[in-house]
Amino acid sequence: MIWDKEAETAIRKVPFFVRKKVRKRVENFVADKGGNRVTLEDVRALKKKFLSKGGMESEIRGYDVSACFGGRGCPNSVAPSSAQLVKDIDALMEKADILGFLKLEVKGDLKFHHELRVSISDCPNACSQPQIADIGIIGAALPGITAEPCTLCRACVEICPEGAVSLNDEGPEINTSTCLACGKCMGACPTGTLDTDKSGYRVLLGGRLGRHPRLGMEVPDILSHQEVLDLVRRCLEFYKTHSRGGKRFSHVLESLSQII
Ligand code: SF4
Ligand code: SF4
Ligand code: SF4
C-alpha cells in the first residue's frame, strides 16, 4: 500500500496508542475500495470515526493478531507458515468469543488495552515485539549436524550472530543454550553438514507493557503449527476461566503449569 506524503503526515498526528490500529484500518478501508494508495481524505475519514464518541469501542474486536513483514518476502524469515497461523489463531479467537467475554467482564467502555494480543515474528529479530504480547510467537529453525563431511570453511562460525557455532577437528558444534534458531548457519553451509533439524515456533506467554511491564516467559521446545494452535486454545480456556474484570492474561498466569 502506498501512502501519499500528506496522508503519512496526518497519520503521525493520531494519538500513538491508536495509531497502529488506525493505520491498519485505513489500509483495509482503501483496499476494500479496490485502491492501493492512501490519500489524506482516507486518513481523515477513519480518524474521525475512531475518535468520535463510541467510535473506538466499535472498532474493538476483543483481540489482535499481528505479524511482522516476514511473510511478505523478508529474507530473514524462518517461520514455516505464519500467514496461515495468523488465520488459524484468528479463527480460535472468534470461536472463543473473546469480545463477548470482555463485554461481560469489563465494567464501562471497552478499550484497546483490554484486548488480548498475539504477535508473530518470523525470526528472532522479533520486529513485531512478541516479547511484550500476551502470546508471542517466533519462527524458529534449529540446526542439526548431518553425516555430510565438513570442509572446516568457517562460514557457519562467521555468520552466527550469537557465537553459538564452534569447530573442532571434525566439524561444527552447536551451543544449544545460546542458539536462537535463526537458521543462518544452515543457509551458509555449502556442504549440507549443517541442516535444519527442527522447524517451527518458539512461544512466549504473558508479556505486557504498562505500569508493570514484563517480558513473556518462553515455553520450552520448538512447537509445530498444530502444537502452537493447541497451546493458544488452552491459553484462551485458561484466560476465560481465571480472568475477571478485564484482567490481563499475564496477570493470571500463576497457574501456568495447568496449560503447558
Ligand atoms: S521479525 Fe525477522 S522475518 Fe519478521 S520482518 Fe523482522 S527481520 Fe523480517
Ligand atoms: S541457528 Fe542461528 S543462532 Fe543458532 S547456531 Fe545457527 S546461526 Fe547461530
Ligand atoms: S559452514 Fe558447513 S562446511 Fe563450513 S565449517 Fe560450517 S559446517 Fe563445516
Image (cartoon, rainbow, N blue to C red):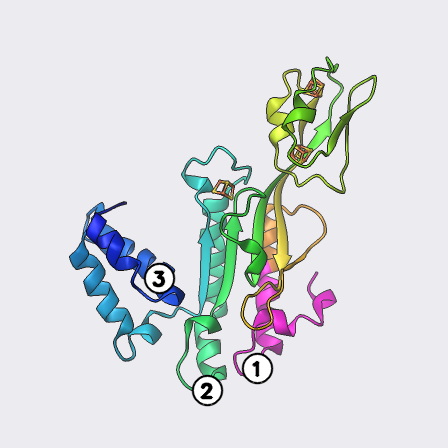
- At 54% from the left edge and 39% from the top edge, which residue is drawn? 80
Q: How far apart in space, not on screen, are marks 2 and 1 (Cα)?
A: 11 Å
On residue 244, the disc is 1
Q: What is the spatial separation of the Cα atoms under label 2 and label 3, in whole angstroms?
A: 25 Å
Q: Give the range drawn in magenta.
A: 232-260
Classify mark 3: residues with Cα within 10 Å, few (<14), some (14-19) or many (20+): some
Q: Residue 242 falls in which quadrant of the image?
A: bottom right
Q: Name the kind of residue labelled 2 in the image.
A: Lys
Identify the element where label 1 is drawn.
loop
Residue under label 3, please give it.
19
Q: Nearer the viewer, mark 1 or mark 3?
A: 3
Q: Given the image, on which type of amino acid does mark 3 rest?
A: Arg
Which badge, 1 or 3, is on the more N-terminal residue?
3
Q: Marks 1 and 3, Cα distance to the nearest angstrom? A: 28 Å
Residue 198 in magenta stretch: no
Measured along the vertical axis of the image, is residue 146 above or below residue 69?
above
Residue at horizontal 47%, vertical 83%?
104
Sequence-earlier tag: 2 or 3: 3
Place of residue 60 in the rendered image (x, y in percent of width and height, measured from the top left): 38, 70
Quadrant containing the C terminus is bottom right
